[in-house]
Amino acid sequence: MGKLNGFLLLGFLLLAGVSASRLAFDDDEFQHAHMAWLLARGEVPHRDFFEHHLPLYHGVLAPLTLGTPGPDRILLLRGGNVLLAAGTVLLLSRAIRLWTGSAGAGVMCWVALSPVFLVKMIEVRPEGFCMFLAAASLCALGGERKRSVLAGLLAGAMVMGSQKFVFPAAGLFVLAWMEHGFRGGVRFAVGGAVFPLLILAGYAAAGAGPKAWEQLVILNVNWKERFSPAMYAGMLWTHSAVLISFAAAGLLTRGHTRAKRAAGVLMLAGIAAVLLIPIPFRQTFLMLFPGLALSAAIAWKALDQAVGIPRIPHKTGRMVLVILGLMPAAYGLGREFETTLEKDLQLMRTLHARTRGPFFDGRGLMFHRPHVGYYPWLHEGLMLMLDEEEYARETESAIRESGFPNVLWDYRIAHMPEALQTFLRESYVAVEPGPLMVPGIRVDRARLAGEGITLRLPSPGTWRVTWQGGEVWMNEELLRSGDRFVRDGKPFTITARGFVREFQIVRVEDGL
């Protein structure tokens, strides 16, 4: 690795580390962290909980969730992805050298500091893991030795990290066939089958095969939520126009047939992914970067071999070009830092300190706590594909069986079936911090008048009663606002004298 690429790698590590400790969380990160937490505790996807992601990345991540993690453990998980991102930069640099003979430091600056690349690679999500494997597979195909089996093995593992990466895997397969002939393609396919067969055997042994087929294949093929890739394609162009322009120029450059063939195949695979995946979020565009990097490196080498940039010393001209290409990326990264992770992290810390046990949480924010029911998290795209009434019934039953765990009322719960929302409102009371809801009952003052009201609490436990105004009796025993009492689930009578308002009973946790 050249000295310049070494400085680039160290600089990228520093920037990625700072970004990982500051940039706002994507909701998907909590879900991926939670899946790793569940795997570390012996639960099996599809059999024990719903999932539509393949498990290899989460299995690799699982050891980092062992012990009794708190909210800050997610920063360690991001740290793992920072290392994967740095490894990807290193491997892409090597791939550029193997395929084009160029150091490609300038091109790798544009790749590494592109907001799409940097932000999505450091998040707790499988795409960074898959990109690392894609770059490794590309290196395996680019050397003098024919390592088609290794390249296929890496590509198969990549697809088991995220099924979306079947597109670059197909591109790498075509490349193996072109580079190493029919036998090379067969060897690649044999290597590529290893990890899928291992995962399939694991599901079959755990009794999760039919559910895995339904949730990983049928559900994803029939995905109902769709949107155009135009918005994020525009974002990529805005921040990485020079990289994309160089990549286009690289395909038109004379010579470099082998490298252009590889770049073209990978770019076509990435474009196919962007166009065919129903929900092409920014992470989908990561699949374009291997092809963009190779093709741009071809153009960079052609520039490097030119006589020079008129009236500007050659090295100075290249440096100016790199800086100009990075200016839109720097602006984009600055915009990313306008929102930070502190709000979510502080909420997680507060909830962790004030509560115990499982959570019902649509985002999966409390990733380090047991989930409730079969669905540990859910978003609108998945809700479109489920039977809402059945989901509401199953979830209500799971909440009751779990003894009414705490609820974090986020925007995802607000989009869940109305029947489930009604049940939660009737069984829970909002407390501080605002999104937190605990089991309890609010009673309108009009219902306390006269002979009072008979109540039944959702579950046995220790409860606290609060109100403002007059006097309150429970089964003819005088209470004070703030009193705690233990109930076993049997009904009791509340009566009031005078003007009583804001009456509520909430469950409290022992020692908290």
Image (cartoon, rainbow, N blue to C red):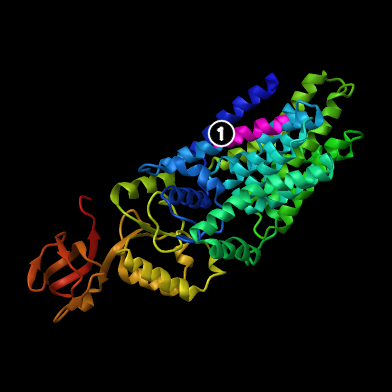
Quadrant assignment, res 16: top right
Q: Which residue lies furthest to the bottom in this view?
A: 451
- Mark 1 sits on what residue? 83
175 left or right of 306? left
Residue depicted at 31% across the width and 64% down the height: 404
Q: Nearer the viewer, residue 339 or 171?
A: 171
* Residue 82 % position (x, y): 55, 35
Q: Which residue lies furthest to the left in this view?
A: 477
Where 362 falls versus 159 (above or below)?
below
Residue type pointed to by label 1: Leu
Where 397 falls versus 138 (above or below)?
below
* Residue 415 % position (x, y): 49, 67
Residue depicted at 12% across the width and 71% down the height: 474
Q: Residues within 10 Å of mark 1 (few under 14, many from 20)?
A: some
Residue depicted at 64% across the width and 58% down the height: 279
265 left or right of 491? right
Mark 1 residue element? helix
Q: Nearer the viewer, residue 511 or 242?
A: 511
* Residue 46 % position (x, y): 50, 60
354 left or right of 114? left
The magenta segment:
82-94
Secondary structure mostly seen in the magenta stretch: helix
